[in-house]
């Protein structure tokens, strides 16, 4: 984390300034009061997705999934375990491709589950297929060496 990070709340989309000296895991959103980092990747809508990518200066991993997708459901606990390990240095969110078809199309999603890593508003890496928690953490850290904490 830098001296002050901009952290977008995954529940309401509020943008929060978070000083590096503050305990990020205990921080709450100034808009809705929910914890900014819960270790549980939120399923976000298009507006919160766009705010996470464009307004946060934290790296963001998005898991594009659908409720009918068996591999997506199998990977969900691993994705949550990875969030518990990677937060607060990396934000992990989920995007339901059935509910947010326009975003999935804009991202060029051809198969699910697909994870995309964004940093500075740009796509850094993408991978398709179910992964274990260890594989997810390793994949993120391979593409973001500063996310090793």
Image (cartoon, rainbow, N blue to C red):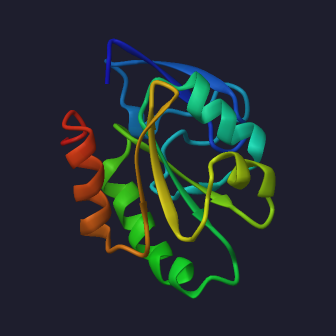
Q: Is residue 108 left or right of residue 62?
A: right
The residue under the point 36% across, 30% down is 23
The residue under the point 27% across, 55% down is 139
Looking at the image, is 63 positioned above or below residue 125?
below
Looking at the image, is 34 positioned above or below residue 66?
above
| Residue 27 visible somewhere in the drawing | yes
Is the C terminus in the top left, top right, bottom left or bottom right quadrant? top left
Which one is nearer the viewer's eye here, 55 or 117? 117
Coordinates of residue 61 in the picture (x, y in percent): 46, 48
Q: Residue most toward the top?
A: 3
Which one is nearer the viewer's eye here, 139 or 15? 139
Q: Residue most toward the bottom?
A: 70
Coordinates of residue 78 in the picture (x, y in percent): 39, 72
Coordinates of residue 46 in the picture (x, y in percent): 76, 44
Q: Is residue 28 left or right of residue 49?
A: left
Is the N terminus in the top left, top right, bottom left or bottom right quadrant? top left
The residue under the point 62% across, 82% down is 69
Q: Is residue 97 left or right of residue 65?
A: right
Marks counted in the figure total 0
Coordinates of residue 93 in the picture (x, y in percent): 55, 52
The residue under the point 26% across, 43% down is 143
Which one is nearer the viewer's eye here, 86 or 50? 50
| Residue 33 visible somewhere in the drawing | no
Classify residue 49 by image quadrant.
top right
């Amino acid at each position: 984390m830098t001296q002050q990070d901009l952290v977008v709340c995954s529940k309401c989309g509020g943008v929060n300034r978070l000083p590096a000296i503050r305990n990020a895991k205990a921080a709450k959103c100034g808009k809705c009061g929910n914890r900014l980092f819960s270790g549980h990747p939120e399923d976000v809508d298009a507006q919160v997705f766009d705010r996470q990518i464009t307004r946060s200066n934290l790296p963001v991993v998005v898991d594009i999934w659908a409720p009918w997708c068996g591999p997506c459901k199998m990977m969900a606990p691993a994705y949550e375990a990875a969030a518990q390990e990677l937060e607060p240095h990396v934000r992990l969110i989920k995007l339901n491709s059935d509910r947010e078809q326009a975003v999935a199309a804009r991202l060029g999603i051809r198969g699910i589950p697909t994870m995309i890593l964004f940093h500075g508003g740009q796509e850094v890496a993408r991978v398709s297929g179910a992964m274990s928690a260890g594989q997810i953490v390793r994949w993120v850290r391979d593409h973001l060496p500063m996310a090793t904490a």
